[in-house]
Image: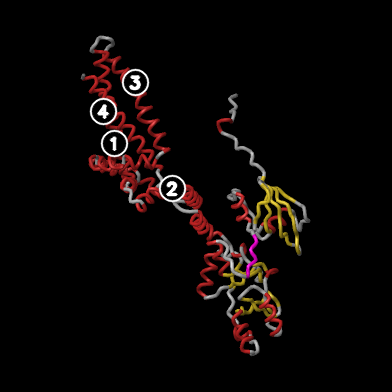
Amino acid sequence: MIYVAYIAVLIILIRLSAIFSGSEIAYSSLNEMRLTHLAEEENNEKAKLALFNHSRYDRLLSTILIGNNFVNLAASALSTQVFIMLLYDTGILSENWAAVISTAVLTIVILIFGEIVPKIVANSNADEHAMKHASFLKVLGYVFYPLVWLVSKIVKLFSKGWSDKVTEDRTVTEKELSDIIDTVEDEGVIDEHTSDLLQSALEFPDIYAYEIITPRVDMVAVDIEDDDEKIIDTILSSNYSRIPVYEDTIDNIIGVIHLNEILKAIADGTPLNIREHMLPVCYIHKTTILPQALRELREKKLHLAIVTDEYGGTMGILTMEDILEQLVGDIWDETDEIEDEIVKISDDTYECDGDMRIYDLFDELEIDDEDFDDDNATVGGWAIEQLGGYPAKGESFDYENLTVTVKQIQNLRVTRLIIKVHEKPPEEDEDDIEWDTKA
């Protein structure tokens, strides 16, 4: 009967070892955002306890390791006693051999059922495991508090030398944040729209003004010396509410006229005095990042900026709407002609606009742009550079698993392109690498 009691206790100790080992992995790999959602939105008490434990991870880890060592030592002592009773007391083997066999058997059992299996299972179900044993670990944390406190003091004493390094390693990179957003979207914590908004906010500080401008050749502007009729015709025939005004040359923008002023002059039947009603000009350099451009427009209470190149010439215009579209997506009004920048025409072929941003194309086609380095903002400009000058219709080039072909050219601009996506070659598996064992 005593054997049964010993074996039952031994099984309980191995089970506790499994709980500790699994918890060590579970709490290091749980999804904190998912647990927060369960705790706040669904008022899940187990999730709250798991988050409480996780917020004190160093103390929790000490509790787990101390508990695991205690149960393993207890299991070792009990196992030795059982094998001595079974093998030595019955005269089958000597006491030393009984102890050796006990150690070997228990090592294998704990390794498989107390370490390997629990950790694999907990890693694949980290959140569930953490919540299931949260109460037990919290109570145990109070039981072991004196030992945990002592361990924490010792760790603190010895960790002074590398504390700065630890702080640096905890910094979350932009790529990691992006991966986190993708993960919580896949798990249903946030919807696709929210995910896109968060990803756009991450990319926002990395976008330069020149990447999203209306280029000089597409600008609608009026000369201050033009007669009223020509100015009114130019403004009314455009789809814009704010028009730059230049003197002598478009490189000398002197102000911006609002459509409302034109309509007032027409309604009142009075001569149009542009100089009197012009808004001031906001100049920004082409390398200005969007957060800075947005800040300047807000401070000056303007909606349009003139973007200049390194020589001070007019490169294009940037509006408040252009900037906000980088955060929330395209903003359409009644006058906009809706045209998709990229259209899928077959399973592996797309047609895109030459003015499409290169990084938007890569996002759409799920191409890794981490190592991409090019000064051109648009796909059309990229094609011109890759093909070594102004290309002819039908010319093409390859980039990674893409073949880019010029479809349409207008006034020296590449306006439409065909993108063919080839299947990526399979990545070489490290397990398949044959190592040269020759000396």
Tags 3 and 1 in contact by the CB under 8 Å rule? no
Task: Please state if 192 lies on the left or on the right of 268 as rendered.
Answer: left
Q: Which residue is mark 4?
A: 74
Q: Residue furthest left?
A: 2
Q: Which mark is residue 66?
A: 1
What distance separates the C-alpha of mark 1 from that of mark 4?
12 Å
What distance separates the C-alpha of mark 4 from that of mark 3?
15 Å
| Disc 4 element | helix
Q: Which color mode does the image show? A: secondary structure
Residue type indicated by callout 1 = Ile
Magenta span: predominant SS is loop
Task: Please state if 279 lies on the left or on the right of 48 as rendered.
Answer: right
- Which residue range is magenta in the image? 335-339
Between disc 2 and disc 4, the foreground one is 4
- Mark 3, other Cα within 10 Å: few <14 / some 14–19 / many ≥20: some
- Residue 40 vertical placement versus 280 (above, below): above
| Disc 2 element | helix
| Disc 3 element | helix
Q: Which residue is mark 3?
A: 105
